[in-house]
Amino acid sequence: MLATVLLIMLIGFLLGIPVAFSLGIAALSYFLLDPVLPLVNIPLRFVTGTESYELMAIPLYMLAGNIMNSTGITDRIFRFTRTLVGHFTGGTAHVNILASLIFSGMSGSALADVGGLGKIEIKAMVDEGYDREFSAAVTAASATIGPIFPPSIPMVLIGGVAGISIGKLFVGGIIPGILLAVYMMVVVYFLSKKRHYPRSERASFSQIVREFTRAFPALTTPVVILGGILGGIFTPTEAGVIAVIYALFIGTVIYKETNVKELFNMFIETAKDTANIMIIVGAAYALAWVFSREQVGLLLTQAITNLSTNPTIVMILIIIGFLIAGCFMNPSANIIIFIPMLMPLVKSVGIDLVLFGVVSTLTLMIGLMTPPVGLSMFIICEIAQITTAQFMRGMGWFFVALLAVVATMLLIPSTVTWLPRILIG
């Protein structure tokens, strides 16, 4: 029966059926093939999967990101980062990356970065003479910082399904998030030098101070969120509420760039986006129950440990599996289905749980930029008005940078584990 379920799921992906329905149909087929199982288990598993305190953080961080995108916050961040790094070779591309690093400390979502900063960044780069392929690639690659640097929506999911401290996952993503920015800036520098991309004039000190002053309220958001979590003032889920309140305060009181109608639209958009994620989460939980009943996790543990019990080799095999799975399912579905299944294996070979969570997050985020279902890829291609083939050509060296960060975490685990150990214990 398991083979039939997997075949039905694969056919659904190949036919272009939405991920939630492909997963749901595959789970339903299992129950239809075994008449002993009551069909009521399907909606039961669906609802149970979405009833989680940790998952409440998802719509909150999404709403905070939507508010920031609609109240001039992203534009102020972009202008401030331009004064800092715009004069380097490939200036606006560096601005793109640094702005994503700052914005990632507010939204926790790659798609929020792409949908908000992406429009500003791609237009600015194209207007200055950067080709569309390169502009799109930089924007998509830099957006992966969002789910790595805290707060992070995917880490909330991983922490919830795997029982890993979300606070430790958040802190564990700080250094890898900075490394992502550094590695991508190195790629940008050499490509820009080779292709003779433009750069801006060096900003004066007074310009830097002026733009910093304008962006300061927005720049304090990551400090408020992380400081509250690390200080034990609120949990990562409660931090989502703080992020929303703080974003509303900045947008309505300080910047005064929103009104009741726009705010209502933000709530509507957040509700739609949340529904899209939750229907995938529910369907994925139903299918995960099927895999659990068939003891797929145990079989996978036995198969891999027969090959090797070396933690690094096991992690490499997991990474390869996630890269393949990311081509067919979005990160939310992959997390719900595979992370719980892999936990016995991870614990049996002694892999640090925080390291596993952060590496898994970045690896699955790469799937957002790969065909056939990469959501970031589709959004970016629409904004930049290029084909997916053009996008993939532009992504070449940025994929190398992303995988280099994964390799760094594997070879130097302390890049992930050191800060959580020092700050949380």
Image: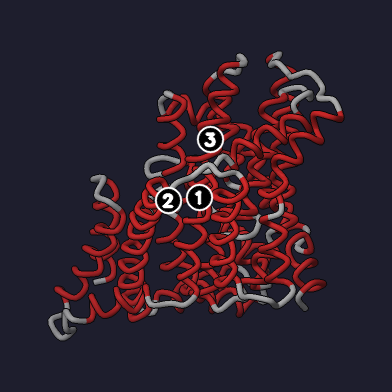
Q: CA–CA distance between discs 2 and 3? A: 21 Å
- Up/down of 50 relative to 377, above or below: below
On the image, numbered disc 1 is attached to which residue? 67
Q: Amino acid at mark 2?
A: Leu
Label 1, residues with CA under 10 Å away: few <14, some 14-19, many ≥20? many
Q: Amino acid at mark 1?
A: Ile
Report if the CB atoms under discs 1 and 2 are less than 8 Å apart: yes
- The first of marks 1 and 2 along the sequence is 1
Q: Is residue 158 left or right of residue 233?
A: left
Q: Which of pointers 3 and 1 indicates the residue nearer the eye?
A: 1
Image quarter in which the N terminus is found: bottom left
Label 2, residues with CA under 10 Å away: few <14, some 14-19, many ≥20? some
Question: x%, y% of residue 364?
Answer: 52, 54
Q: Amino acid at mark 3?
A: Gly
Image quarter in which the C terminus is found: bottom right
Q: Residue furthest right?
A: 205
Q: Residue at x 57, y 43 (%)?
A: 143
Q: Secondary structure at mark 3?
A: helix
Report if the CB atoms under discs 2 and 3 are less than 8 Å apart: no
Which circle marks residue 263 in the picture? Answer: 2
- Up/down of 261 relative to 57, above or below: above
Q: CA–CA distance between discs 1 and 2? A: 8 Å
Which circle marks residue 118 in the picture? Answer: 3
- The first of marks 2 and 3 along the sequence is 3
- Up/down of 141 relative to 416, above or below: above
Q: Residue at x 80, y 29 (%)?
A: 207
